[in-house]
Amino acid sequence: MVSALQGLQDVIVGAQAVLVDAAIEAGVSCFIPSDYSIDFTSFPPGDNRNLDLRRDFHKHLDKTSISATSIFNGAFADLLTGPMPLILFKLKRVLYWGDADQRMDFTTMDDTAAFTASAALDPSTPRILRIAGDQLSARELAAVVSGVTGTKFRLFRAGGLAMLGTLIKVARTVAPGEKELYPAWQGMQYMRNMFDGRAKLKTLDNDRYPGMRWKTVRDVLSEAQVRHP
């Protein structure tokens, strides 16, 4: 059974617990939880509210009798042309915090879904599978978007990671949004996780299913040129 639920405590912990218990009752052999994210096993609770909810669900999942496999894919590459504020198209800048050479993992939603489908049919998956369609630093991302658009994109350092941590605390105080899925500070938490290096995938399982053809960030940006001429 593959879960693709999205939400807060009542969904990620509550609804998924009902789902996995139903899967066990139905005799399902393996459960894939709705993780599809950066690898949150490498940093402590408190760094990212939404990922903490997934960690809480794992506590329930790991106590059950069902075999489970989590899939970590880094960030969705598709978001680079939309809500993820890394490429500032109007300003011709690539934003980063901390180190411009810290590499990050990106995988398209379609590639993540295709890999997950293969994993669901695989009787011998491990507890965690890690994939990345591309791995780029902010500096490398600036070079890629410059090449795709034919316009020079420069780096824009917003500040260090300590400053970002302070801004997260301020944003969470001024505009709590605890019942919102993606309040402003939640996106900032993802940024901090990606740029501090702890969520970086060290080993990849990209070759586990030979039929996969992985889309790169260059592919994603090239296909989106009509929206960002």
Image (cartoon, rainbow, N blue to C red):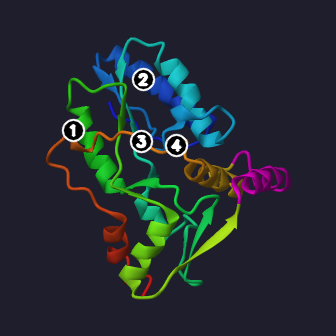
* Pointer 4 local density, CA inside 10 Å: few below 14, some 14–19, many at least 20: many
Total numbered badges shown on the rendered structure = 4
Q: Name the one closer to the observer, 177 or 211.
A: 211
Q: Nearer the viewer, mark 3 or mark 4?
A: 4
Q: Earlier in the sequence, mark 1 or mark 2?
A: 2
* Pointer 1 local density, CA inside 10 Å: few below 14, some 14–19, many at least 20: some
The residue where tag 4 is placed is 199
The C terminus is located in which quarter?
Answer: bottom left
Would you say residue 178 sits in the magenta stretch?
Answer: yes
* Pointer 2 local density, CA inside 10 Å: few below 14, some 14–19, many at least 20: many
Q: Amino acid at mark 3?
A: Ala
Would you say residue 123 sits in the magenta stretch?
Answer: no
Task: Judge whether 28 appears above or below 76 on screen.
Answer: above
Q: Amino acid at mark 1?
A: Arg
Q: Earlier in the sequence, mark 1 or mark 3?
A: 3
The N terminus is located in which quarter?
Answer: top left
The residue where tag 1 is placed is 208
Residue at image position (19%, 50%) is 212
Q: Name the disc covering residue 4, or none.
A: 3
Q: Which residues are magenta?
A: 160-179
Q: Name the one closer to the observer, 68 or 155.
A: 155
Q: Name the disc covering residue 20, or none.
A: 2
Question: What secondary structure is the stretch in magenta mostly built from?
Answer: helix
Q: SS for tag 2?
A: helix
